[in-house]
Amino acid sequence: MKLEKAAAQLEALGNPTRLQLYRILVRAGDDGLAVGSVQGKLDIPSSTLSHHLKRLVDTGLVTQERQATTLICRANYPGMNALIGYLADECCADAACAPAVGKALA
Amino acid sequence: MKLEKAAAQLEALGNPTRLQLYRILVRAGDDGLAVGSVQGKLDIPSSTLSHHLKRLVDTGLVTQERQATTLICRANYPGMNALIGYLADECCADAACAPAVGKALA
DNA sequence: ATGCTATTTCCATATCTATCGAAATTGGGT
DNA sequence: ACCCAATTTCGATAGATATGGAAATAGCAT
């Protein structure tokens, strides 16, 4: 993963509203969630939500799929994995880091 | 970890210059690196560097220690671990994510 | 005390971001 | 064709961020 891309993804997640949004999509699992449903959970105007969502999609952290008039959004796990992997690689260049990461997965 | 704190750390890392800066500190290991040395590697004005560094310190990703006139900076591994752990927890609520994270550690 | 080096703070500014109401669009149903 | 619901785009604004030159500060050495 390129540093630029990692930074873009980190920045995308580095906003409380978007991180919350991403969390919601992760918890929704493979079924995903319609934009409207997400809006119900976040209670923000649709235009604001759309902007945030676009950011997550553009950086590859979320995918979208049309189903009739609704747009289903899903957390893109591989994208997140790549990002976590990048961070782990950067961090775990020093061995002192590895145990705690292992713990996080346990 | 609170969502707000995670978002702040992600935002801090979500800037190419700061991510590069953090990388440099990680690779420097436990010895850390003086601000001046970092500046030599990044080739940016000291005031700009100082701002970015402050951001990383404020969010708990970097620590600093005075040694005479120079300031030694170190990547704060536990801080990064907590962040990676948070992301992994959010992401790996779904099992489909776990294998790739494991791979990143291998 | 003076000077030297390292680093930060002050200040200014250009750019980017977050927010959201209103209007436009998209994609079926009827 | 028309309408309705879902979602996006447009346009505007307040505030945050990134950047860096210049001045201030910190901490030793002499």
Image: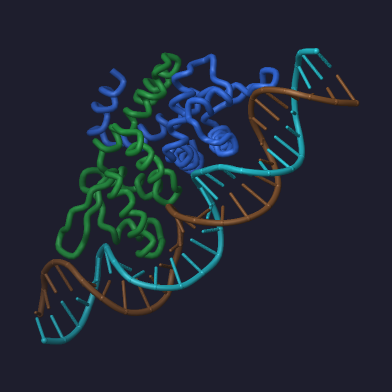
Chain colours: A blue, B green, C cyan, D brown
**Residue A63, percent from left and from top:** 58, 26
Taking the spot 29% from the left edge, 32% from the top edge, the residue there is B1
The answer to whether residue A16 is left or right of residue B79 is right
Taking the spot 31% from the left edge, 54% from the top edge, the residue there is B54
Count of labels in the image = 0
Q: Which of the two residues, A51 or B18, is positioned nearer the viewer here?
A: A51
The answer to whether residue B73 is left or right of residue D28 is right
User: Relative to A92, is D20 above or below?
Assistant: below
**Residue A44, percent from left and from top:** 51, 35
**Which of the image's four quarters has the C terminus of chain A?**
top left
The answer to whether residue B14 is left or right of residue A62 is left
Is residue A9 shown to the viewer in this render? yes
**Residue C27, percent from left and from top:** 75, 22
Is residue A59 shown to the viewer in this render? no
Q: Which of the two residues, C8 or A29, is positioned nearer the viewer here?
A: A29
User: Relative to B14, is A28 above or below?
Assistant: above
The answer to whether residue C14 is left or right of residue B88 is right
Kindly indicate the quadrant of the structure image that contains residue D25: bottom left
Taking the spot 58% from the left edge, 22% from the top edge, the residue there is A34
Taking the spot 34% from the left edge, 31% from the top edge, the residue there is B84
Q: Which of the two residues, D22 or B101, is positioned nearer the viewer here?
A: D22
User: Relative to A73, is A9 above or below?
Assistant: below
**Residue A67, percent from left and from top:** 67, 18
Kindly indicate the quadrant of the structure image that contains residue A14: top left
